[in-house]
Image: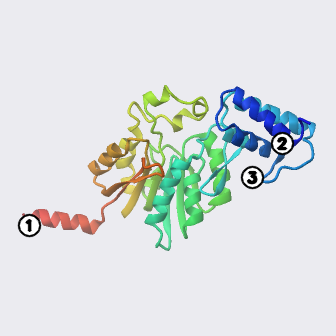
Amino acid sequence: MVNTPRAAMQAVQQKLAEAGLDSVQFESRILLETVLELPYGAPLPQQPLTEAQQQRLAELTARRCAHEPLQYLCGTWEFFGLEFQVGEGVLIPRQDTETLVEAVLELRKNEPSTCLLDLCSGSGCIPSALSVHLSGVTGAVLELSPEAMGYLRQNLKRHAPQLECIAGDVLHPPAELLHRQFHIITCNPPYLTAADMEQLQPEVAREPETALFGGTDGLDFYRKLTPLWKPALQPAGWLVYEVGAGQAPDVEAILQENGYAQVHTVPDLTGIGRVVLGQRQEFRDMRRAVSAFGDD
């Protein structure tokens, strides 16, 4: 019978393949699990789908065949072992961004507490993962989009309720944040180039453009945010960016030009430079430099 779970999944798989989609086995399974409200990888039940479930599966399949992102259809997606609410209007958490989380975990692994600020927070996946895996995390997140803010608040309530959620523009910082001092500022800014935007996959084109487009060369936000948010870092605090493929050398140069120390790049699992970070110099180091200059 076509309405048994296994037969229904095979029918979905065929439709996805006819639509030219990849990973049809995986995606058909995910869509069926979403309709049946099953955890990922759970055994499929024996009983046939109800009429309502069949209708729901047909609807989701049609939307996926029209290239609506699978993550939006599911309503949740996994990042760093945690589940996040996602949907239209918010950037989908990606595995690439886990490299940023791992870099910060390494920086703060022996610290009893961390004051964190996450810019362009989107779904809140970065500060949530850090709050779950580090002790004593406090601080704030900043997000401009009203659509993303709904998901951000839900996800922080679940994973990091101690963090302050602030609506605002990273390019016009709220004074309350600039006057605070953070150990870590994280940011996954828009970094796609104009050429990238012309070649987007249909699924990515459904995500908010404001979370994707970083100017002609993709570097606009790095140029503006790097000096702008430096006062909000504690001495020896770190600014940690995610970057696009091939952008690491340019972002390193931006950090160095703005006086950051220990600037370096962390590669992702494929070897692509994915995270660039730099440290605000400690006051005593700056005094030492001034003293050395005066001795010459």
Mark 1 and mark 2: Cα distance apart in space: 79 Å
Question: Can see residue 124?
Answer: yes
Q: Which residue is mark 1?
A: 295
Amino acid found under the numbered disc labelled 1? Asp
Q: Residue at x 47, y 72 (%)?
A: 111
Residue 119, numbered label: none
Q: Residues within 10 Å of mark 3 (few under 14, many from 20)?
A: few
Q: Earlier in the sequence, mark 2 or mark 3?
A: 2
Label 3 secondary element: loop
Choose mark 2 or mark 3, whichever is in front.
Answer: 2
Q: Which residue is mark 2?
A: 6
Label 1 secondary element: helix
Residue positioned most to the left: 296
Left or right relative to 188: residue 163: right
- Quadrant in the rendering for residue 103: bottom left
Mark 2 and mark 3: Cα distance apart in space: 13 Å
Q: Residue at x 32, y 45 (%)?
A: 249
Q: Quadrant of the N terminus?
A: top right
Amino acid found under the numbered disc labelled 2? Arg
Q: Earlier in the sequence, mark 3 or mark 1?
A: 3
Q: Is residue 183 positioned above or below 86 on the image?
A: below
Q: Which residue is mark 3?
A: 41
Q: Earlier in the sequence, mark 1 or mark 2?
A: 2
Q: Residue at x 62, y 49 (%)?
A: 152
Q: Quadrant of the C terminus?
A: bottom left
- Quadrant in the rendering for residue 12: top right
Q: Residue at x 72, y 43 (%)?
A: 74
Mark 3 and mark 1: Cα distance apart in space: 68 Å
Q: Residues within 10 Å of mark 1 (few under 14, many from 20)?
A: few
Residue 269: x, y in percent?
48, 52
